Image: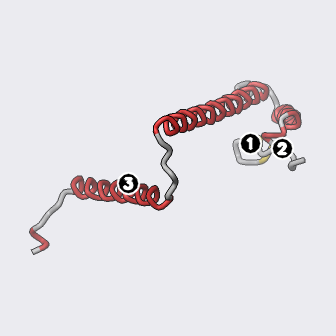
Amino acid sequence: MLDSVRISLKVLNAAQLAAVAAAAFGLAWFGGMLSGAPRPAGIERHALGQTLVQAARSYADALDEELSASINDARNAALLLRLDDPAVPDSWRAGRLEDWLALNPRYRDAALLAPDGALRAAGGPAE
C-alpha cells in the first residue's frame, strides 16, 4: 500500500520546513512564558523598545566601524607588500610584513605564504 503513495520531495521539504518553523516558534513562545518577566505597561514598554532598538543600532554601528577598519588595514597591508609587482623579492615583502605586524599587533596571526605553501613571514607571539 505504501508503494502506491508518492509524495514529491518539494512537498516533503515544505512540510519539514513548516514543522521546524512551528517548533521554533513554539519553543520561543514557551520560553517567553516560562521566563515570567513582569510586563511593563504602556509608556514603559515603548521606552524599553526604543532603548533596545537604540542599543542594537549602536552595536551594529560599532561592528560596522570595526569591520571597515579591518578591511582598510588589510588593503593597506596588501598595498604595502606590492603583491602585483613581480620584481619585488619575497625577502623584502617578508621584512615589510614583519614591520607592519610590529606596528599592528592586533593582526599578529597574519602570515605571508609562498605559492608552494612555505611560510615567508609571520607575526610574533602575543605580548
Pick whichever, 100 or 71, lies toward us.
71
* Sequence-wise first label, 3 or 2: 3
Q: Which residue is mark 1?
A: 114
CA distance for labels 2 and 1: 15 Å
Query: Which residue position holds label 3?
Result: 25
Q: CA distance from mark 3 to mark 1?
A: 50 Å
Crowd rating for badge 2 (residues with CA inside 10 Å; few <14, some 14–19, many 20+): many
Return the residue at label 2.
123
The residue lying toward the viewer, choosing from 74 and 127, is 127
Q: Is residue 32 left or right of residue 125?
A: left
Front residue of 40/56: it is 40
Q: Is residue 118 above or below residue 87?
A: below
Could you classify mark 1 by the number of other residues whose Cα lies within 10 Å: few (under 14), some (14-19), or many (20 or more)? few
**Label 3, label 2: how many angstroms apart (C-alpha)?**
47 Å
Counting from the top left corner in percent of width and height, residue 71 is at: 67, 30
The disc labelled 1 sits on which kind of residue? Ala
* Badge nearest the viewer, 2 or 1: 2
Judged left or right of residue 4, residue 53 is: right
> Dividing the picture into quarters, in which one does residue 29 lie?
bottom left
Q: Quadrant of the N terminus?
A: bottom left
Q: Who comes first in sequence, dot 3 or dot 1?
A: 3
Q: Amino acid at mark 2?
A: Gly
Is there CB contact under 8 Å for labels 3 and 1?
Answer: no
Q: Is residue 20 above or below residue 48?
A: below
- Tell me the amino acid under the disc marked 3: Phe
Which of the 4 image quarters holds residue 8? bottom left
Tell whether label 2 touches label 3 (CB within 8 Å): no
Q: Secondary structure at mark 2?
A: loop
For image coordinates 81% across by 43% down, the residue present is: 108
Closer mark to the observer between disc 3 and disc 1: 3
Image coords of residue 62 (percent x, y): 66, 33
